[in-house]
Image (cartoon, rainbow, N blue to C red):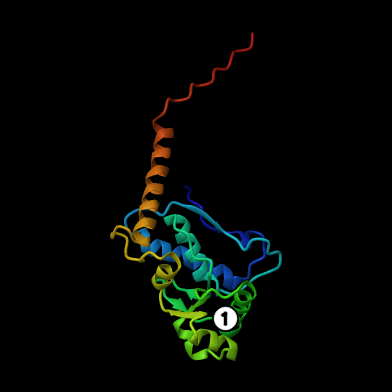
């Protein structure tokens, strides 16, 4: 509960470039257009790349950061066997990024070292499909169903894949957006109640100053 919005810890620590800063600010725009049409957006959330002590830049992680925020608000865990890349705009549309082949191959190599389960994969922007030129071993694993590449055009598709729950909308029970909206509604009510309790409480006694003798 709070009113500080999304705090970019990387920016506060001066470890974030302007493009990454812009990506995080866009997340606030998405939250406002999606959930703040009938109530104020009253939350305090922080984003950070843990134990990263060098500068970062780019907006390729903005969709990932949005999934993390929505996961926390809905209290829904995200699958850890799926990697995510993709920029996102204020309407939740997933946009193209650079280095898509290297990102897929890098996660594939990690999965090979830990053991392919047949469930692992990468979510990539649909717009990057035409840029795919993957190594032969990655292509072979995908063809055999041992690894997966999921092209997505909107964060709703990613939410369904990562949570196993339909993204839905803010009014349909049992969907991610409904859970997030309910949580934000409760936060708005709680902060209003907290403010009212302070205003409606007993007035503090006025201090008296003794006159010098």
Front residue of 153/29: it is 153
Front residue of 61/142: it is 142
Number of numbered callouts drawn: 1
The residue shown at (41%, 34%) is 197
Quadrant housing residue 46? bottom right
Residue 189 in the image: above or below residue 204:
below
Residue 75 in the image: above or below residue 212:
below
Quadrant housing residue 35? bottom left
Label 1 belongs to which residue?
104
Classify the position of the C terminus by image quarter: top right
The residue shown at (63%, 59%) is 12
The residue shown at (39%, 31%) is 200
The answer to whether residue 179 is left or right of residue 64 is: left
- Furthest toward the right, the residue is 54
Task: Please provide percent x and percent y for residue 109.
Answer: 63, 79
Task: Please provide percent x and percent y for residue 113.
Answer: 65, 75
- Furthest toward the left, the residue is 172
> At numbered mark 1, what does the secondary structure look like: helix, strand or loop?
helix
Front residue of 128/134: it is 134
Graded by Cα atoms within 10 Å as few (under 14), some (14 to 19) or many (20 or more), the crowding at tag 1 reads many
The answer to whether residue 72 is left or right of residue 174 is: right
Task: Please provide percent x and percent y for residue 195.
Answer: 42, 39
Task: Please provide percent x and percent y for residue 53.
Answer: 71, 64
- Furthest toward the top, the residue is 213
């Amino acid at each position: 509960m709070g009113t500080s919005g999304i705090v970019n810890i990387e920016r506060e620590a001066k470890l974030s470039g302007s493009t990454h800063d812009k990506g995080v600010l866009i997340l606030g725009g998405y939250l406002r257009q999606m959930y703040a049409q009938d109530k104020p957006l009253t939350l305090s959330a922080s984003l950070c790349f843990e134990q990263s002590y060098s500068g970062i830049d780019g907006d390729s992680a903005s969709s990932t950061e949005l999934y993390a925020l929505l996961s926390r608000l809905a209290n829904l865990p995200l699958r850890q066997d799926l990697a995510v890349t993709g920029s996102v705009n204020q309407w939740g549309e997933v946009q193209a990024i650079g280095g898509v082949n290297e990102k897929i191959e890098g996660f594939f190599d990690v999965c090979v070292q830990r053991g392919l389960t047949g469930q692992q994969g990468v979510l990539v922007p649909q717009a990057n499909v035409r840029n795919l030129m993957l190594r032969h071993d990655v292509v072979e694993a995908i063809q055999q169903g041992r690894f997966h590449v999921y092209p997505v055009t909107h964060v709703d598709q990613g939410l369904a894949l990562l949570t196993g729950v339909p993204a839905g909308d803010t009014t349909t029970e049992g969907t991610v957006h409904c859970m997030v909206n309910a949580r934000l509604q409760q936060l708005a009510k709680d902060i209003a109640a907290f403010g009212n309790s302070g205003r409606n409480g007993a007035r503090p006694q006025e201090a008296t100053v003794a006159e010098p003798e």
